[in-house]
Amino acid sequence: GGTICIYNGTNWVEQPTGTPEVFYGIYAVGYVAYAVGTNGIICRYNGTAWVPQTSGVSVDFYDVAFWDEELGFAVGAR
């Protein structure tokens, strides 16, 4: 759980996320990426680090998508 890897052009490198939650979906818009998973976890990648954010719900998110850099959607199940 809590594992995200980033491809640097040559290798896949594990990135720390600061959470033990399991991730199911990831989406990048511009230079920002979001990963979603169990217990409502949403992590935002700011170009340097993954930062856990609280969604305010305890569902498991399975996917995330964005319309633009300010409007996004996450789907899941209780």
Image (spheres, rainbow, N blue to C red):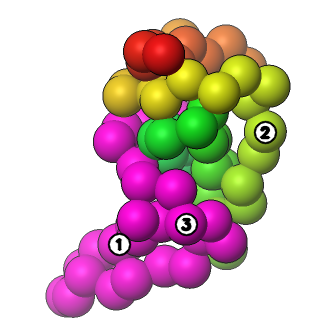
Alpha carbon of mark 1 to alpha carbon of mark 3: how far?
15 Å
Label 2 or label 3, whichever lies nearer to me, is 3
Place residue 48 in its image quadrant.
Answer: bottom right
Choose between 44 and 17: the one closer to the eye: 17
> In the image, 33: left or right of 8?
right
Q: Is residue 47 at all visible to an observer of this figure? A: no
In the image, is residue 48 part of the stretch drawn in magenta?
no
Question: What residue is drawn where x is 73% and y is 60%?
Answer: 51
SS for dot 3: loop
Q: Which residue is mark 3?
A: 20
Q: Position of residue 76 (x, y in %)?
A: 43, 17
Q: Position of residue 73 (x, y in %)?
A: 55, 14
Q: Position of residue 22 (x, y in %)?
A: 42, 54
SS for dot 1: strand
Q: Which residue is mark 2?
A: 54
What is the number of the mark on residue 5? Answer: 1
**First to last magenta residue range:** 1-29
